[in-house]
Amino acid sequence: MASQRTLVVVRHAKSDWGQAVPDEERQLNERGRREAPLIGRWLADHTDHVDGLDLVICSTATRAQQTWRLAGAETEPTVRVRYDERVYAAGPRELMSVLDELADDIGTAALVGHNPGLTELVETLTNQSVELKTSALAVLRWEGTWADVWTRRAALVTHATPRE
C-alpha cells in the first residue's frame, strides 16, 4: 500500500551581498534575519498543508543554515536537521537524488536550499511554474515512496512567501 509523501521546498531568506566572502559563506542580511522566522510561523499556522515535519534537509551554505535555525525556532516540536553539501548549487536531478535516499518512515520532509535549483525542482515534479522568491516555500505531495520522486507526478498543494 502506497503512503503519502509531503515535501516542503524552502528557499533561504535574503542574504548579504556586501560581504567579501565566498558565496557559500554569505550570511543573511537584516531583512533575511527578520523574515526567516516567518517561514516557521507559516509552517506552524498551516497544519492543514504541513502537519509536522519529520526531517529537514538543509544546504551547507551559511545563509541556508541560518534560515532554518530561525525558521525552526518557530516550529514545535524541534525537527531533526541533516546538512547536505549536495543541496548547495544543486539542480533538480541532484535534489531528486537526495530525496530518493530518504527512509520510508519519513512522511514529511523540508528541503532548504537555493535557486534556481529549487524553482526548477518544483516545476520538474509538478509541471507547474512557481516563483520562489527569498523566504518562499512550496508544498508538494505525492502517493508512494521517496524514490517515486522520479515519476515526477507530485501535486503542488500550495506556495507562499510568508512575508507577503
Image: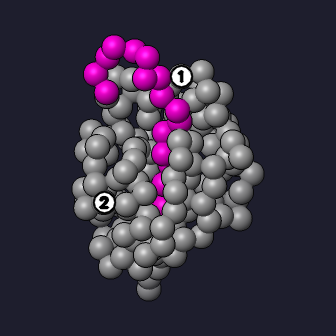
Can see residue 50?
A: yes
Decide which of 16, 125 is in the foreground and name it: 16
Quick one: quadrant of the N terminus?
bottom left
Establish if 86 lies above or below 129: above
Amino acid carrying mark 1 in the image: Asn
Q: Secondary structure at mark 1?
A: loop
Instruction: Bin the neighbour count of mark 1 within 10 Å (Cα to Cα): few under 14, some 14-19, many 20 and up.
Output: some
Decide which of 8, 3 is in the foreground and name it: 8
Can see residue 107?
A: no
Q: Are marks 1 and 2 in contact (CB under 8 Å)?
A: no
How far across and how far down the image is residue 154, in percent?
45, 75
Q: Check disc 2 and report the residue beneath it.
A: 92
Q: Secondary structure at mark 2?
A: helix
- The structure residue drawn at horizontal position 52% and vertical position 57%, both measured from the top left corner, is 131
Question: Which region of the structure is painted magenta?
Answer: 6-23
Q: Is residue 161 left or right of residue 16?
A: right
Establish if 87 lies above or below 23: below
Q: Please tell me whether residue 62 belongs to the stretch shown in magenta.
A: no
Which is more N-terminal, label 2 or label 1? 1
- The structure residue drawn at horizontal position 44% and vertical position 29%, both measured from the top left corner, is 63
Q: Please tell me whether residue 17 belongs to the stretch shown in magenta.
A: yes
| Dominant secondary structure, magenta | loop
How far across and how far down the image is residue 116, in percent?
37, 51
Amino acid carrying mark 2 in the image: Pro
Q: Which mark is residue 29?
A: 1
Dividing the picture into quadrants, the one containing residue 71 is top right
How far across and how far down the image is residue 69, in percent?
53, 31
- Report the number of discs: 2
Rounded to the nearest whole Å, what is the CA distance between mark 1 and mark 2? 27 Å
Establish if 96 lies above or below 112: below
